[in-house]
Amino acid sequence: MMHRIILIICVLVQHHPFFCSGEVVTPKPIIVNGTYLNPELGKYHARLRTISRSCLDIKENFGVTTDGVYYLTTANGVMYQAFCDMTTAGGGWTLVASVHENNINGKCTVGDHWSSEQGSDPKRPDGERAWVNSATFGTAEGATSEDYKNPGYYDITADDVSVWHVPNDAQLQNWPSTAILRYHTETKFLTENGGSLYHLFRKYPVRSGEGECTNDNGPSVPVVYDTGDKDSTTKLYGPTLRDHFEPGFVTFRVFNEKKAVMAMCSGIKPTGCHAEHYCIGGVGNLEQCGDFTSLNELPATNSSKELTEAAVLIFYR
Amino acid sequence: MMHRIILIICVLVQHHPFFCSGEVVTPKPIIVNGTYLNPELGKYHARLRTISRSCLDIKENFGVTTDGVYYLTTANGVMYQAFCDMTTAGGGWTLVASVHENNINGKCTVGDHWSSEQGSDPKRPDGERAWVNSATFGTAEGATSEDYKNPGYYDITADDVSVWHVPNDAQLQNWPSTAILRYHTETKFLTENGGSLYHLFRKYPVRSGEGECTNDNGPSVPVVYDTGDKDSTTKLYGPTLRDHFEPGFVTFRVFNEKKAVMAMCSGIKPTGCHAEHYCIGGVGNLEQCGDFTSLNELPATNSSKELTEAAVLIFYR
Amino acid sequence: MMHRIILIICVLVQHHPFFCSGEVVTPKPIIVNGTYLNPELGKYHARLRTISRSCLDIKENFGVTTDGVYYLTTANGVMYQAFCDMTTAGGGWTLVASVHENNINGKCTVGDHWSSEQGSDPKRPDGERAWVNSATFGTAEGATSEDYKNPGYYDITADDVSVWHVPNDAQLQNWPSTAILRYHTETKFLTENGGSLYHLFRKYPVRSGEGECTNDNGPSVPVVYDTGDKDSTTKLYGPTLRDHFEPGFVTFRVFNEKKAVMAMCSGIKPTGCHAEHYCIGGVGNLEQCGDFTSLNELPATNSSKELTEAAVLIFYR
């Protein structure tokens, strides 16, 4: 009995060694009677316990089914926090990036991390190179308020993408309910393109002048809708352009008639050569440059405010 | 006695399981004889132990009375480090933001995160929207060298603010001793405005053209001085303007005669309509735009170098 | 024997208290039979175990000999991750900064954190002041894709520097093999200059107009080559300028004939007064401003693409 009591004591204070004579030494206990003295520390330890290379690993190895912010680590051991969608189509989606337009009228101005922050310059045909480099910016909770790119963008090896269009400045806890469009791919197209957009865009450079419409476009992948459908997708884009694309796809690395390049056409497959009006992440001449390129250049071709005032969140799985 | 010895062993190595037969297995111990093998790890664990939603929680729940950098977490579990003032007027103040002018002559140029980084643009009447979005920038230790905003700005629910004017590039350990002006409110004005400046400015948008001087000004709150007084506050501002405001207050969301908007007037309540010369975080026409707006536009209205070369640190409690 | 079994149990579950009656309580175990249930958590704990003020401390106190990303902490307790070179000349080198040119043709444009992001302005003779302030930017894994500065730059006290020229966008794991030039100093010159570049540049301000070529140049320190040699160093710079400098040194704070200032001349000691063509981190008139200043202003003076398309990584030891 006597040593039983000692055992309990020694275990209750298991975070600081203890001479069983009874005198406590530093550090202080963090748990007493199986309860964290600091509940926030308990929550932190619970989150840290599942640290993994991706949200998919967290789901598969730890059975996590709750959306939220989790700890991830790169192959090199760089730790970061990312939002995990653990519910859509089985879950396991890691938010790795967002494309946010902070100035729809600015053409490659400050804050256009996914195109160019220094205007259009023939000597910089691939702008800031964010699609193919290891620079990161923004934060998970700020992903609808500014451009966002975390280490997962280049570190995670994935099969598919999921894309959410979420109104600017929406708070993380409201993303799922406020998203105006959500879809994902199921073809494992990333696998045959290096396992990430980072590698896909090294294969299909986002460099203006390097290709022609429509011969040199990158992959166009059919999508499964999670919010919205083909009709609602079409209505988001400029009215006079709705016969220039086919809804139900996501397309990467597209050139327009002037050899300007766009990184991504969200929810559609271009059939015409005016990609600057319905694709994003564009670098080209002055009028065809910017995170949201020329999505509202002219009244006739203007996309809906719904689309231009929503950030494009990109997930991997 | 024999099991006593075993107990000591088993506890001393409590960070790596141990078969009491005696053979050690991974991981390695971090504590021996009640002392951290790595003192820096001990300090880290001590800091982590108090992780909370705010510095006030740290003070109240853990009795911390030492100024310094502590771990905080948002409601979503995003972890960050923030400076806590644990001594002023009872302590518990969280540094959530700083307004730093990196170019007093630039009017809404790069680095003006609290106004606009892209000049004055009628199509962007609220500039970068930093006062009301979830973007963050800067670091705790860099708060006097660049604009700073951490997740606490939007995540913490607080009653009052404290403001320090600290010379540019001063190091954290020297902030209290070098501050030229320090004051705090005690009216709990944040409580009736959503519990943070993030919510206050959603109620009183920092948007040019949306209001008139002086009808549409936001709250003006009396302050208690911790460094300086009403006289020293007055002397910080442009000599010819000293009858345009009343010292002893902090005021939020103020318009000038041209409908330019300023987010904050530090230490004063404007009585005139030239807020651009004594209020900060302004968006308006070209001459009335910038983190420090027009604080030294004209010799006669110039504020003191003391003021214009000091960062404005904003705390919540 | 009976209490022996109890001991084993109590230790195996040492991360959650345990009533030796046998019923488990929260939190969940992270280690079973001496093995981490989550290997990534094991790796994280292993890295955290060596948290120190510098990579040299990690090497000396924990015998670490593997290059990689480790946890560091500032005097104020701000935690960050940094790349440690644990092999070159005995190891213990902390990567604290990188100078990356994102637009070789831009003269002090956005992204020129080490010179000026707002063009050349006589009223801002020391530009962004990054060499002497506590602002930080970039990430360890992104150090070859954008300018990088971590808290170690101002927090670590060191004797010497090591410099690597690594091709833009190279991934961290490839830095050592792809570097085109690597060298380090052994004179302990930092010690007599405050123990860091942060303090050295407070002694020798990087401020245009404040000095003359060549009277007011800062320290020029002989280097030991780790990759390349004096000849390969010379060949990296503009052909017509190769008699304007002496290879085998690294020089800090240099003025040119027009009183423009450059922070660092990598691998060389200037003998002429055209530092803008072979030194970096420059602030001066419009043509002599930028992270890589005028390294390829004119065909005759152009440096090699090898040099201008590689980031300059700066280590302390």
Image (spheres, coloured by chain):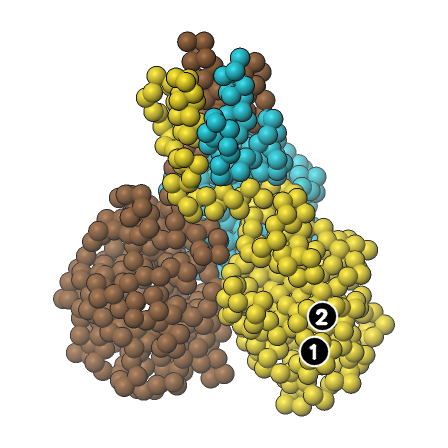
Chain colours: A yellow, B brown, C cyan
Number of numbered discs visible in the structure rendering = 2
Q: Nearer the viewer, mark 2 or mark 1?
A: 2
Residue C83: where, in percent of width, then height? 57, 40
Residue positioned 78% across, 85% down in the render: A243
The quarter in which the N terminus of chain A is drawn is top left
Report the amino acid beneath label 2: Tyr
Tell me the subunit letter for badge 2: A
Report the amino acid beneath label 1: Thr
Q: Residues within 10 Å of mark 1 (few under 14, many from 20)?
A: many
| Residue B183 seen | yes
- Against C3, residue C76 (above or below) is below
Residue placed under numbered mark 2 in the picture:
A225
Residue placed under numbered mark 1 in the picture:
A233
- Against C136, residue A234 (above or below) is below
Q: In this view, does B207 lie to the left or right of C85?
A: left
Q: In this view, does B159 lie to the left or right of C60?
A: left
Residue positioned 59% across, 30% down in the render: C32
Q: Is mark 2 on a helix, strand or loop?
A: strand
Q: How far apart are marks 2 and 1 (CA)?
A: 10 Å
The quarter in which the C terminus of chain A is drawn is bottom right
